[in-house]
Image (cartoon, rainbow, N blue to C red):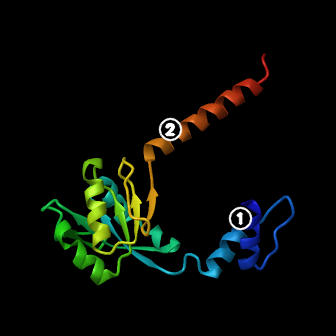
């Protein structure tokens, strides 16, 4: 696998890597961007405009990585018809229309786990090709749909584990007085 990755990088990078040292990160990122990996914008909708959905709608950095969030989808009548960061919020029933009008290919799922699978199924049925799932449940998608599950609780747990591991190593290294 590493050999394939090195070969793939050599195909898109002008600057050669250094044996056993690899490539400088900033040069590698610049060359990947120049190659066009993240320069093509893909439209997305956020399904669930609660705290997390609203935070993602407000974040402007996704465009740098090729993701343009075009709208929010929610079932809360108080949110429908409003805007978050100049992005309109539509009712769940309007998802098909929004996907068609914005050419959205990705649905970002930020709903409670009880509703995630049903909404993913609906999103796929109206033409969504990829799911970025923040709901705390593993969802199922057809084989032709790309799925990325994010589990913030497990990421936090891993962060905490690594912090504790680092702290215990540092305690062992400190000389006794």
Q: Spot the residue most to the bottom.
A: 101
Q: Nearer the viewer, mark 2 or mark 1?
A: 2
Q: Position of residue 90 (x, y in %)?
A: 20, 70
Q: Secondary structure at mark 1?
A: helix
Q: Position of residue 52 (x, y in %)?
A: 34, 55
Q: Which residue does the numbered mark 1 point to in the structure image?
A: 25
In the rendered image, the quadrant that contains the C terminus is: top right
Which image quarter: residue 31? bottom right
Which image quarter: residue 96? bottom left
Q: Earlier in the sequence, mark 2 or mark 1?
A: 1
| Residue 59 as seen in the image, left or right of residue 87 | right
Residue in view at x 70 percent, y 68 percent: 26
Q: Secondary structure at mark 2?
A: helix
Residue in view at x 72 percent, y 66 percent: 5
| Residue 163 as seen in the image, left or right of residue 1 | left
Q: Position of residue 53 (x, y in %)?
A: 32, 59
In the rendered image, the quadrant that contains the N terminus is: bottom right
Viewer-proximal residue, 25 or 126?
126
Which image quarter: residue 78? bottom left
Estimate how packed mark 2 is, as few (under 14), some (14 to 19) or many (20 or more) residues with alpha carbons within 10 Å: few
| Up-down relation of residue 73 to residue 173 (above or below) | below
Q: Spot the residue most to the front.
A: 143
Q: Which residue does the numbered mark 2 point to in the structure image?
A: 157
Q: How many marks?
A: 2
Q: Spot the residue most to the right.
A: 19
Q: Which mark is residue 48?
A: none
Q: Spot the residue most to the left.
A: 77
- C-alpha span from label 2 to label 1: 27 Å
Viewer-proximal residue, 70 or 130?
130
């Amino acid at each position: 696998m590493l050999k394939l990755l090195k070969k793939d990088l050599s195909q898109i990078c002008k600057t050669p890597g250094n044996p056993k040292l690899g490539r400088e990160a900033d040069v590698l990122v610049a060359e990947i961007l120049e190659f066009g990996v993240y320069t093509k914008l893909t439209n997305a909708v956020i399904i669930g405009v609660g705290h997390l959905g609203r935070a993602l709608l407000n974040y402007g950095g996704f465009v740098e990585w090729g993701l343009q969030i075009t709208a929010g989808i929610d079932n809360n009548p108080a949110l429908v018809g409003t805007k978050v960061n100049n992005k309109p919020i539509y009712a769940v029933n309007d998802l098909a229309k929004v996907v068609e009008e914005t050419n959205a290919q990705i649905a970002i799922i930020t709903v409670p786990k009880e509703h995630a699978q049903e909404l993913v199924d609906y999103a796929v049925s109206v033409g969504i090709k990829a799911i970025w799932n923040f709901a705390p449940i593993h969802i199922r998608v057809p084989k032709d749909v790309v799925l990325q599950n994010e589990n913030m609780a497990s990421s936090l747990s891993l962060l905490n584990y690594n912090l504790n591991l680092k702290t215990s190593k540092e305690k062992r290294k400190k000389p006794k007085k």
